[in-house]
Amino acid sequence: MLNNRRIKAKALFLVLVMMLNCLAFSGCGKKAQGGSDEVKKITLVLDWTPNTNHTGIYVAMEKGYFAEEGIEVEVVQPPEGGAEVLVASGKAEFGISFQDTMAPAIIGDDALDVTAVAALIQHNTSGIISRAGEGMDRPSGMEGHSYSTWNGSIEIAMLENVVTADGGDFTKVELIPSTVTDEVSALSTKSTDSIWIFYGWAGVKMELEGIETDYFAFKDINPVFDYYSPVLIANNEFLETEGEYAKGFLRALKKGYEYAIDNPEDAAKILCDNASELDYDLVVASQTYLASEYKAEVSRWGYIDPARWNGFYNWLSEEGLVEETIPENTGFSNDYLPE
């Protein structure tokens, strides 16, 4: 009897030791990618201050979706040179970029070591906004009116394309250097007649402020301008050597954005909790608008359509807006997306 008690006591002691070890090393939960108990630290650099383009990121952090993949994410603001430079240097594994601004970075001898791995919004939601009733509800109506420009070569070429295609004379559009920091104020004070905006933020803000506007989207005038904006980019070496973590990161991000699609108001609250400087009413309205834009008609979150990607880059090449022709299927990959 005594021996049996000793055996039971020893067994209980061993169970307790195992439980303590399990707690100490967090080994009783799901292991990180590759079977390791180590948490993978990943840095993601934004393209701008936090906004509704980024909501799925903050949802994935808040809901523990990254943690489920054995990943800890640090979100940082972009440097002056932009997210592409930081990601290419390996100082950040992921970043937010845009297909148009990526173009010069992915060709030539000094091409940056980055690849777009997910579309955060399925369609280009940008266009030209103006005060209602002044004739700028279509591109040709910009004749004789001012437009605030950043003077980017792609920007100007796109604007000229849509104005000309609509029968307008682009030389009669008054281009003024952009000093716009607030689109509502700029139109209200008549410091400019028209501005390029992303409707999901600035357009929605106009609606909230009760400003009556006219607007046309670039993709509705010329389908080749339905490029991807914004996109998630990744460091190429990271993709090659840590591909499973890249896939885990995207699995978590998919859950975050799909949660935002299904629960826009709650997702808006999560974003505001992480960026208290944001206006809550604007975030809710913007989130509601983007809920139908993150995936739009596609069934697979983040999918990049090769035909649309190549179509825009082919146009840049044909127009001489890049130093050399961009080969088809350059700069993006769907290989890391979850099904």
Image (tube, rainbow, N blue to C red):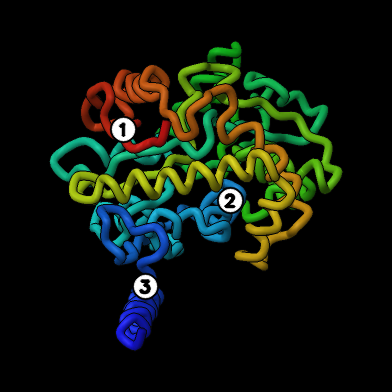
| Cα–Cα gap, marks 1 and 2 | 23 Å
In the displayed structure, does residue 9 sit left or right of residue 209? left
The picture quadrant where one finds residue 326 is top left
Q: Secondary structure at mark 1?
A: loop
Q: Which residue is mark 1?
A: 335
Taking the view exactly as shown, the residue that stands out farthest to the right is 210
Q: Residues within 10 Å of mark 1 (few under 14, many from 20)?
A: few
Amino acid identity at mark 2 = Thr
- Disc 3 or disc 1, which is closer to the eye? 3
Q: Residues within 10 Å of mark 2 (few under 14, many from 20)?
A: many
Amino acid identity at mark 1 = Asp
The picture quadrant where one finds residue 25 is bottom left
Measuring from the top left, give residue 250's x and y in whole percent.
41, 44
Q: Residue at x 60, y 13 (%)?
A: 166
Measuring from the top left, give residue 17's x and y in whole percent.
34, 80
In the displayed structure, does residue 134 sit left or right of residue 69? right
| Cα–Cα gap, marks 3 and 1 | 35 Å
Q: Secondary structure at mark 3?
A: helix
Q: Which mark is residue 55?
A: 2
Q: Secondary structure at mark 2?
A: helix
Circle nearer the N terminus (1, 2) = 2
Measuring from the top left, give residue 301's x and y in whole percent.
49, 33
Image marks 1 and 2: residues in contact by CB distance under 8 Å: no
Q: Which mark is residue 22?
A: 3
